Image: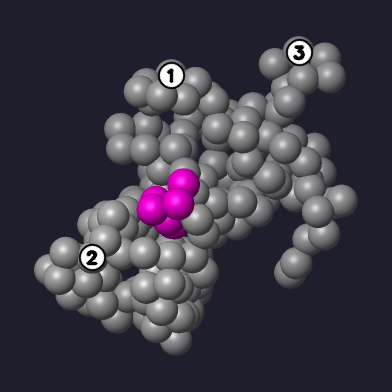
């Protein structure tokens, strides 16, 4: 299940409608041919998630493969969390330790912005309930990411309706 860093390759997702990024680079495990399994959490790529299998091909000889479609969805669910300035690093660590009991993996994107991945078999509803309570206390804001993660309004290319459920 685990891939060593030496087994991973960098792929890119084009983000033509993103307000700040033109592309997002992701780590992926080559599966053969033009198929790759995502091994990093997409921050800006709407609809992509950890362990999704994507089709990617370089746009030129020797170029970085670019995602052209989703072949199979992973089973992980993603929430984006933005902490308030008053919720310091120690408190954030305490909150994440509590969420881990429900099968969560937090990833720091930018100090106060995190991705929270709920693993298959994790208690997604319990995680959302807890995040909702912390939001009401003013400690954070959060949102669920349909189909995995990323920036609202961007759908990965060539996603078939059968793969759209997230």
Residue drawn at the location 79% of the way across and 48% of the way down: 8
> Label 2, label 1: how many angstroms apart (C-alpha)?
33 Å
| Quarter of the figure with the C terminus | bottom left
Residue 70 appears at what percent x and percent y? 54, 41
Q: Which mark is residue 62?
A: none
Q: Residue at x 82, y 59 (%)?
A: 4
119 in relation to 114, above or below: below
For residue 81, what is the image quadrant?
bottom left
Does 4 appear in magenta? no
Q: Residue at the location (37% across, 73% down)?
A: 91
In this rendering, which labeled residue sits more in front, label 3 or label 1? Answer: 1
Query: In the image, which disc is placed on residue 16?
Result: 1
User: Would residue 45 appear left or right of 33 to someone viewing this image?
Assistant: left
Residue 72 coordinates in the image, percent (x, y): 56, 51
Q: Which residues are magenta?
A: 110-115
Is residue 79 in sight in this rendering?
yes
Are the residues flagged by discs 3 and 1 in contact, CB closer than 8 Å?
no
Q: Quadrant of the N terminus?
A: bottom right
Q: CA distance from mark 3 to mark 2?
A: 46 Å
First-in-chain label (2 vs 1): 1
Q: Is residue 73 above or below residue 35?
A: below
Q: Residue 89 or 105: which is nearer the viewer?
A: 89
Tag shown at residue 139: 2
Residue under label 3: 60
| Percent position of residue 115, x then y | 44, 56
Residue 114 inside the magenta-drawn segment:
yes
> Label 3 to label 1, Cα distance in Å?
19 Å
Q: Secondary structure at mark 2?
A: loop
Say whether residue 99 is left or right of residue 140. right
Whether residue 96 sits left or right of residue 25 in the image: it is left
């Amino acid at each position: 299940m685990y891939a060593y860093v030496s087994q991973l390759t960098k792929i890119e997702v084009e983000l033509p409608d993103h307000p700040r990024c033109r592309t997002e680079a992701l780590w992926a495990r080559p599966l053969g041919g033009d198929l790759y399994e995502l091994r990093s959490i997409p921050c800006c790529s709407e609809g992509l998630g950890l362990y999704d299998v994507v089709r990617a091909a370089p746009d030129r000889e020797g170029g970085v493969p670019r995602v052209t479609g989703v072949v199979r969805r992973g089973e992980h669910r993603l929430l984006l969390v933005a902490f308030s300035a008053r919720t310091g690093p120690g408190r954030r660590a305490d909150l994440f330790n509590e969420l881990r009991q429900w099968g969560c993996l937090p990833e720091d994107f930018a100090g106060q912005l995190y991705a929270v991945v709920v693993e298959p078999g994790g208690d997604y509803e319990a995680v959302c309930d807890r995040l909702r309570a912390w939001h009401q206390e003013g400690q954070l804001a959060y949102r669920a990411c349909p189909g995995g993660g990323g920036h609202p309004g961007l759908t990965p290319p060539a996603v078939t309706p059968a793969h759209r459920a997230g």
